[in-house]
Amino acid sequence: MAKLFGFSIEDNEKQPPSVVSPVPPNNEDGVDHYLSSGFFGSYVDIEGVYRTEFDLLKRYREMSLHPECDSAIEDVVNEAIVVDTNDSPVEIELSNLNASDGIKKKIREEFKYILELLDFDRKAHEIYRNWYIDGRLYYHKVIDMKNPQEGIQELRYIDAMKMRYVRQTKKKSREETNLRLGNLNNDNPMDYEFPEVEEYFIYNPKTSYPTTNPSSMGGHGGIKMTKDSITYCTSGLVDRNKGNTLSYLHKAIKALNQLRMIEDSLVIYRLSRAPERRIFYIDVGNLPKVKAEQYLRDVMMRYRNKLVYDASTGEIRDDKKFMSMLEDFWLPRREGGRGTEISTLPGGQNLGEITDIEYFKKKLYKSLNVPISRIEGDGGFNLGRSSEILRDEVKFSKFVGRLRKRFSAMFSDMLKTQLILKNIVTPEDWDTMSEHIQYDFLYDNHFAELKESELLNERLNSLQAAEPYIGKYYSQDYVRRKILRQTDVEILEQDELIEKEIKAGIIPDPNAPVDPQTGMPIDSTAGMDLGKPVMEPEVDGSSTEAPEMPKGGEI
């Protein structure tokens, strides 16, 4: 095999020797421990779905070409990736991160740099679609090997058919070639000595997986690449029996095949049974067999009418020399019968029945995780109350949210490598910080907006009903927490904003004394712009009456 290519990020913080477990490390990426050979091998699949990972990916991509699957995939991708002319499809959220403003600023800058390397604003739809169909995504993080502190220079997409993640168990002696993961430590029975495991990627530019030992791949273009140099993002679905990573299209394989077979059989049935055919009984008398057959052919060619429409030229021509299965029947009849007779063979009945096709189509839609109302298109979009929202839409919204969470692992891996290479954070710091770094995607779910709007209206109505009892039975804090459902962070933010707007004169102070006539706070009217002042009429010298003073105010 070719020499190991790429770079590695070492973690200085190891588990102490007292932390022991008989269970090997859990891996949720669909890659099991392999021995020193045969990890590219094929296996027998009784159901006939797939034999190798290469066949599996090929089937997924063929499925995406079918109209029903393509429509479902587009619905999922369009819901997850919302493209706006002004905003980026995804932003980094650092409000929960306990770090200095300088570190946060650098993290935002590096994340923006990664999005520029991916050209995510323009290619977000394609990247997400490839990940959703294949169930995995590979990117090579290209760096300057002489100056790694400059960070990632380029992110190159790798076809999933050309890449394979390998977790290989190293065997040191012949006695250790058993299938156990480790041997029992005599000093500590709970401590299992797990064999050393090497994790790496195999890149094979031939677009097919070899079934030979990886040691023989050196002359076949197989390149061994380090784990840290590749960004590997999976769907999270794993076949527990075979240890393979699956796509969300996997459970639709059977439903799609059934639908295709039903549709093909329907076409064949309609072509064969749709036309009405006639049966001609020709009286041949006492003619010998050879002459009777000749007479039958003559009559058939004389009265036969076979006009064919040529779709390429638009002409109608007579093809009497060709015979098809949809033509009439010509049968001889001996003397003594009823003579020459013509009868009609009716065509197939109930040709418009497509109940079975509708059943399998709905079954396919359910397996694709998309609400049926979206794909069928017979129901219009309703901007009514949230009570009219289908439960399928709520489930679909949660499904898209889970997909976004899983897809964000790609950003986390790239950002981790970039920050560590540029010495902004250490690997130990990243393990602590990564839990508090979130990725905010643009949201365009109208049903969620309707739901939030109606919830807010109901809370405001409840607040209005409870307002006479505030200070008597309920406190302000209780109302804000239980009725308005405000969190501690939201309460602090709103209090600061209200105080700021009162000082700026945008809103009046609710605790200020109120003028009984105007209903306006007395102290707050001085700093507020209440419009143009009302000008008093000019007093003519001939008038003897004193101007009337305003009531209720102090002079």
Image: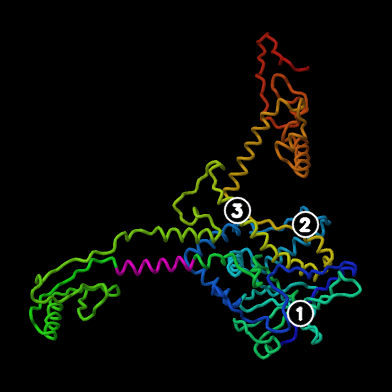
The residue sitting at the top extreme is: 544
Frontmost residue, 415 versus 485: 485
* Magenta residues, dominant SS class: helix
The residue sitting at the right extreme is: 187
Residue visible at 62% across and 75% down? 160
Please provide percent x and percent y for residue 89: 63, 59
Mark 3 and mark 1 lie on one chain; the one further toward the N terminus is 1
Residue located beneath label 3 in the image: 397
Q: Quadrant of the image for the C terminus?
A: top right
Tell me the amino acid under the disc marked 2.
His
Residue located beneath label 1 in the image: 169
Marks 2/3: CA–CA distance:
23 Å
Frontmost residue, 202 versus 154: 202
Mark 2 and mark 3 lie on one chain; the one further toward the N terminus is 3
Are dots 1 and 2 in contact, CB under 8 Å? no
Q: Quadrant of the image for the N terminus?
A: bottom right
Mark 1 and mark 2 lie on one chain; the one further toward the N terminus is 1
Q: Quadrant of residue 411?
A: bottom right
Is 480 covered by the magenta stretch? no
Residue located beneath label 2 in the image: 436
Please provide percent x and percent y for residue 152: 74, 72
Q: Quadrant of residue 94?
A: bottom right
Write down the region rendered in magenta.
256-272
Please provide percent x and percent y for residue 120: 64, 65
